[in-house]
Amino acid sequence: MTTHPPPFPMRHALPACLTPTVSTRASAALYLRPSLRKSKRIFPPDLITVSWGTNDWKYSEFEDFANRCSAFFESLTQNYPQTPILAIAPIWRADLDESCAFGSFSKTAEFLKEISTHYKNVLFLDGINFLPRDIFYYRDSHLHPNDKGFESYTNSLAAALKSLDNNFLNL
């Protein structure tokens, strides 16, 4: 399976809403790359967003996901203890009612929410409603957002960021 860059790149649109300087380390990976968790920047970022889980739900088992996710957040918080980190659960997908070895689709969000409670600088955001539950917003009619879908995601994420407690953003 290959991934394709979004036609409406959120990494370029989100800064227009929030006016930060943006540096992208990874985008649209099939699975989380273990090497990313050990990656450390010379200067700490102002904010880290981690959108994770939809491909893990479809292509892995829960225990494997839980282990990789736990190790990733442990390393990330050790590398960036003063940087706010958003753990964003997956967006709606048209096939979320399918049966997978992982279990229910909602387990990804439940685990991300639970793991975020272990760290003072990690906050859970549920991405399930960042896009309307309508295939019109998906270029492949089930998973990958089109321009309108990425616009909706970006606007939803920007609104969520603007509503966050300043204490969290200024760790």
Image (tube, helix red, strand yellow):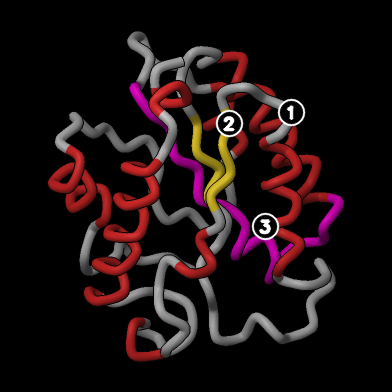
Tag 1 near tag 2, CB within 8 Å: yes
The residue type indicated by label 1 comes to His
Q: Identify the residue shown where x is 62% and y is 57%.
A: 53
Instruction: Judge left or right: residue 125 versus residue 69.
Output: left
Q: Which of 98 and 38 is in front in this view?
A: 98
Q: Position of residue 129 (x, y in %)?
A: 48, 69
The residue type indicated by label 3 comes to Ala
| Stretch of the chain drawn in magenta | 46-63
Mark 1 vs mark 3, CA separation in Å: 15 Å
Instruction: Judge left or right: residue 100 versus residue 164.
Output: right
Q: Which image quadrant is residue 58 in?
A: bottom right
Q: Nearer the viewer, residue 153 or 25?
A: 153
The residue wearing badge 3 is: 109
Mark 3 vs mark 2, CA separation in Å: 14 Å
Q: Position of residue 130 (x, y in %)?
A: 42, 66
Q: Earlier in the sequence, mark 1 or mark 3?
A: 3
Instruction: Judge left or right: residue 87 versus residue 101.
Output: left
Residue 56 within the magenta-colored segment of the rendering: yes
Residue 53 within the magenta-colored segment of the rendering: yes
The residue wearing badge 1 is: 118
Mark 1 vs mark 2, CA separation in Å: 8 Å
Which mark identifies residue 171?
A: none
Mark 3 secondary-structure assignment: helix
Q: In this view, does 61 lie above or below 131?
A: above
Mark 1 secondary-structure assignment: loop
Q: Which image quadrant is residue 128 in?
A: bottom right
Mark 2 secondary-structure assignment: strand
Which mark identifies residue 122?
A: 2
Q: Identify the residue shown where x is 26% and y is 48%.
A: 11
The residue type indicated by label 2 comes to Val
Q: Identify the residue shown where x is 50% and y is 31%.
A: 85
Q: Identify the residue shown where x is 41% and y is 90%.
A: 135
